[in-house]
Image (cartoon, rainbow, N blue to C red):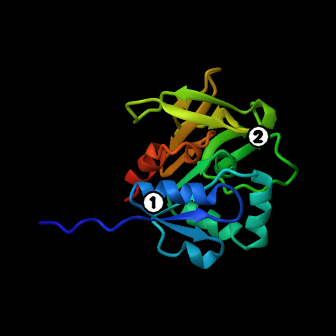
């Protein structure tokens, strides 16, 4: 008889954004959320969530807290990551309409357009079919990005009603334009945690 697998320790970048909501979703799917604010918090993680929030603010705080390079290095070394909304922007190799010198973590071979759907008042919700899930996901878009260019190794998991990719996977990286952490539906988090080795 094999011993039960230990719960996965998943970091949640805790500088700004939906930290509490992502932590609750991870707990719901049996993972142990670990707040990440300093380089030493990256030790022993099975994966990390980069939450929604404000991408330029999170990028600036990554620099202030000396986390930008250590996290980039961890991702290059194979640390799995899931980014929602601002997290998708931060995981992208290229940002369209970003602020000058806006830092990103990189890793996803995509171009992402910030605030692609418009301002806060243009926020909306939609039911989306997502590859790997049998039932549609209720997606909440708040000043959300979309993908404008896809690299070769990027798999599209969902598209918004206008056809732009809004959920993607590339290797150990998963990203959504929308906020599943705000809906009480933890299936996207479960998809991420199930993929952790």
The residue identified by callout 1 is 27
Q: Position of residue 35 (x, y in %)?
A: 58, 69
Q: CA distance from mark 2 to mark 1?
A: 29 Å
Quadrant location of the C terminus in the rendered image: bottom left
The residue located at (82%, 45%) in the rendering is 98
Name the residue nearer the viewer: 10 or 104.
10
Between 6 and 64, the one lying in front of the other is 6
Is residue 56 positioned above or below 2 on the image? above
Q: Nearer the viewer, mark 2 or mark 1?
A: 1
Q: Residue furthest left?
A: 1
Q: Secondary structure at mark 1?
A: helix
Q: Which residue is mark 2?
A: 114
Q: Is residue 123 left or right of residue 74?
A: right
Q: Residue at x 59, y 45 (%)?
A: 182
**Horizontal and vertical percent position of residue 196:** 40, 57
Q: Residues within 10 Å of mark 1 (few under 14, many from 20)?
A: some
Residue at image point 79% right, 58% down: 57
Mark 2 surroundings within 10 Å by alpha-carbon count, few (fewer than 14), some (14 through 19), many (20 or more): many
Q: Residue furthest right?
A: 100
> What secondary structure is marked by label 2?
loop
How many labels were placed on the picture? 2
Instruction: State the mark number for residue 184.
Output: none
Quarter of the image with the N terminus is bottom left
Q: Position of residue 161 (x, y in %)?
A: 61, 21
């Amino acid at each position: 008889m094999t011993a039960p697998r230990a719960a996965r320790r998943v970091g949640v970048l805790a500088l700004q954004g939906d930290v509490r909501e992502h932590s609750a979703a991870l707990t719901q799917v049996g993972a142990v959320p670990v707040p990440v604010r300093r380089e030493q918090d990256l030790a022993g993680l099975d994966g990390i969530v980069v939450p929604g929030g404000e991408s330029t603010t999170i990028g600036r705080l990554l620099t202030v807290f000396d986390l930008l390079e250590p996290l980039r290095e961890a991702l290059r070394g194979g640390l799995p990551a899931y980014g929602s909304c601002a997290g998708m922007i931060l995981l992208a190799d290229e940002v369209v309409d970003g602020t000058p010198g806006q830092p990103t973590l990189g890793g996803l071979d995509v171009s992402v357009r910030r605030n692609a759907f418009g301002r806060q008042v243009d926020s909306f919700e939609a039911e989306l079919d997502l590859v790997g899930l049998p039932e549609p996901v209720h997606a909440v878009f708040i000043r959300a990005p979309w993908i404008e260019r896809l690299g070769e190794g990027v798999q599209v998991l969902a598209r918004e009603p206008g056809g732009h990719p809004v959920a993607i996977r590339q290797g150990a990286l998963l990203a959504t334009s929308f906020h599943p952490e705000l809906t009480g539906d933890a299936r996207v988090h479960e998809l991420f945690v199930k993929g952790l080795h």
